[in-house]
Image (tube, helix red, strand yellow):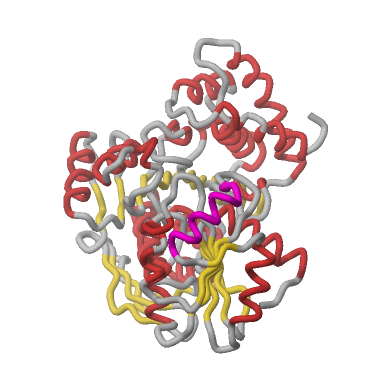
Amino acid sequence: MQTCKEAIDWIEQQAPYGIKPGLERMEKLLEKLGNKHRRLKSIHVAGTNGKGSTTEFLQKAMSEAGIEVGTFTSPYVTHFRERIAMNGQPVSEEDFLAAANEVKPYVDELAEEAEGHPTSFEIVTAVAVQYFATRAFPDVVVFETGLGGRLDATNVVKPMISLITNIGEDHQAILGHTKAEIAREKAGIVKSGVPLATTEKDPEIRRYFDEVATSLRTKTYQLDRDFFIEDWEALSAGQKFKFRSPYPFGTKEGVELKMEGAHQAENAALAMMALDYLKMLYALPIEEDNIRRGLLEAHWPGRIEKVSEAPDVYLDGAHNRQGVEQLAAFVQQRYAEKNVYIVATVTEEKTPEELFAPLMELQPAKMYLAPYTGYKALPEAELVKHAHAIEAEPASSISAALEAVQVDAEAEDLVLITGSLYFISAVREFLHQTNWKI
């Protein structure tokens, strides 16, 4: 491969191999590459929602302390290389190409062996490991799971601490049809002697996490039992709260976030719990001021992201019921008296009546369903059926939906664009290319 584009195309062309849960191929591929993942100190993040935001909080805080931080996340919003980053900056085209070329011969070898051809996610995970271990040399890598946990390609790492944000109903065809089944998959990231911190609130799932941790001779740190959010309040932009962890330096008054939504306080608290643990147990060289500055500067595209004013326009990649509930809660807290216009999409395996129910309770002035081109996109005819089912207006394109909102919405109204991170990526690209202003 001669260019970065060729390398990315090669990885994306492996999509027909689908999603194949299991660690055998990943372990064999990394063995061929010299098991370089064992050199990396890491944090492992799983959960239905909030993984990316938690990773962003961790990265920003540690970078403020001068710690070199690698991150591996998915999906991307603007371009593919975002998935592998150092100190918040995507891997360079040169380094991505070099790491991909080093991985490719072993992918080709493995394709001929009993384990079978690696998936595209397994390949990009191996490229990330190769880059971090041979070129970037980070002090810490934050690995975000792609799907589930137990059989996810990232579960080959032995982290310093594991994090599970929350458990919601998503990807049920692969992870299970109940929250308990999904929790078992997520809890598969817990390793012997490696603690788990979580912001999950369901009592039965919390007890299950405790049982798993005890069986593996480690412990859990749980929100509202071991670490706490207190005195939360919304600011004119953002929010602030008091944080407490079990350590002598664990109390932090008036922590401020620019990121919107009360759920982001939970993601930030989870990151702080992890950082306090690493400071106490691994002497991580980070101070309270580093954490405060890092959390305040954290920004994660497509997560209640304000992109325009008069009217206020937000992009949010909510793609499951829990994410939509969080978005609706933000609107009720911040824009309770406003007329709401919604531009959304529906992806494969989603039922709009169930998915968008929390938003429909807001009694939006109008809702449009728009198509996009990309992963999990539905044919336009299917989207039209879904629109009729929820009494939304079908739009022929993203531009058509935005043009309609431009006509309908007044300066004091609110516009939400949501339904999928892949859809948000397409919307962001459209806005960037056209310099669109609603």
Q: Residue at position x 28%, y 74% from top? A: 230
Establish if 30 lies above or below 383.
above
Q: Residue furthest right?
A: 2
In the image, residue 291 lies at what x, y percent? 46, 66
Q: Residue at position x 77%, y 67% from top? A: 434
User: Between 404 and 295, which is closer to the camera in this rendering?
Assistant: 404
Magenta-drawn stretch, dominant element (helix, strand or loop): helix
Q: Quadrant of the N terminus?
A: top right
What span is in magenta?
377-390
Is residue 213 part of the magenta span, yes or no? Answer: no
In the rendered structure, the answer to whether residue 201 lies left or right of residue 16 reads left
Establish if 66 lies above or below 292.
above
In the image, residue 161 lies at what x, y percent? 36, 45
Residue 390 visible in the current orientation: yes
Q: Residue at position x 38%, y 47% from top? A: 170
Q: Residue at position x 38%, y 66% from top? A: 326
User: Between 337 and 55, which is closer to the camera in this rendering?
Assistant: 337
User: Between 317 and 11, which is closer to the camera in this rendering?
Assistant: 317
Residue 64 visible in the current orientation: no
In the image, residue 257 lies at what x, y percent? 46, 73
Q: Quadrant of the C terminus?
A: bottom right
In the rendered structure, the answer to whether residue 325 lies left or right of residue 3 reads left
Report the label total. Answer: 0
Is residue 386 part of the magenta span, yes or no? Answer: yes
Establish if 61 lies above or below 118.
below
Establish if 339 lies above or below 330.
below
In the image, residue 355 lies at what x, y percent? 40, 58
